[in-house]
Image (cartoon, rainbow, N blue to C red):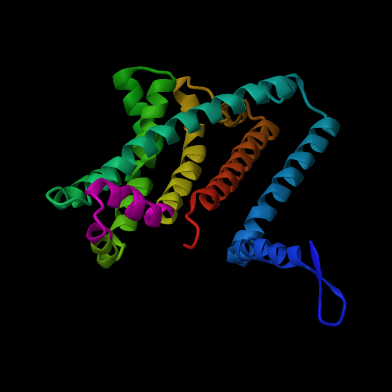
Amino acid sequence: MSSPAPGGAPIDAGAGRTDAEAAPKKRARSALSPEDRGLLFGIPILIVLVLAGWAIWRANADLGDIELRQLAWDNVATLLWQHIKIVVISAVIVMITAVPIGVLLTRKGVRTAAPIVTAIANAGQAAPVIGVIVLLAIWLGFGVPVAVLALVIYAFLPVLANTITGLRSIDPALKESARGMGMSPLQVLFRVELPIAVPVIMTGARTALVLLVGAGAFATFIDAGGLGSLITTGITLFRFSVLVSGAIFVAVLALAIEWLARVLELVVKPKGL
């Protein structure tokens, strides 16, 4: 409702509220660094351009029977879904195991074991992923479960290490203040420590996801499917177009996962951090 000003001009009482409501949104936008803004808007554009270029090439290329079968839309969609399924399952298992273990290794009485556990996880990532997949397949058999196990071993370290780093970097005075307010150890963990450590943990999760997309291409060697099938077919049958197409799809999927992880990181990041 408007009220007259001393000069007779009406004053809109809602204008102040509108400005006050718009201020947090402006601050949220300004909180994004130029690099974040460039990646959040640039990655989708790059993905669209690459896929559009590939679609135009496929529609006009003179392909043989083998290329047409391998690059058929239904076959590409099937392999893409298989790849995404392996990556998502592996990422979920990594998160629900690495984060709790990382939290446990920062607690009193257990933190002395952190270097040992980190060294074991480091060995899992240092080993060539194709070697881990093949050795596990020889031991446990072929298929998706074995591929997922190998990828979990390979991508475990970034999430574990970042969880430990994020929790250890918290100012002890903050935890003491929370305890002084009457919080229990679990309340301190879930209401103070984890929210502050979320950005660091999510950075590790983003790294793990990109590693999983690339390493997931090796799942085809143990009959677990995925986009790696296009790469191996291209190499085996000397079909350069199929080989390059498989590499392009893996790269585009990695970019898409990177973008989604960055968006998720911004969503779950506590306000004010």
Which stretch appears magenta? Answer: 178-198
- Residue 190 sits inside the magenta stretch: yes
**Residue at 75% from the left image edge and 22% from the top image edge:** 68
Please, is residue 76 above or below residue 121 in the view? Answer: above
Q: Is residue 52 left or right of residue 252?
A: right
Nearer-the-camera pick, 45 or 71: 45
Please, is residue 211 above or below residue 71 in the view? Answer: below
Quarter occupied by residue 94: top left
**Residue at 70% from the left image edge and 34% from the top image edge:** 241
- Residue 227 sits inside the magenta stretch: no
Quarter occupied by residue 38: bottom right
Nearer-the-camera pick, 168 or 176: 176
Nearer-the-camera pick, 58 or 184: 184
For residue 72, say whether it is visible.
no
For residue 41, say whether it is visible.
yes
Q: Main secondary structure of the magenta part?
A: helix
Relative image position of residue 129 (x, y in whole percent) = 39, 37
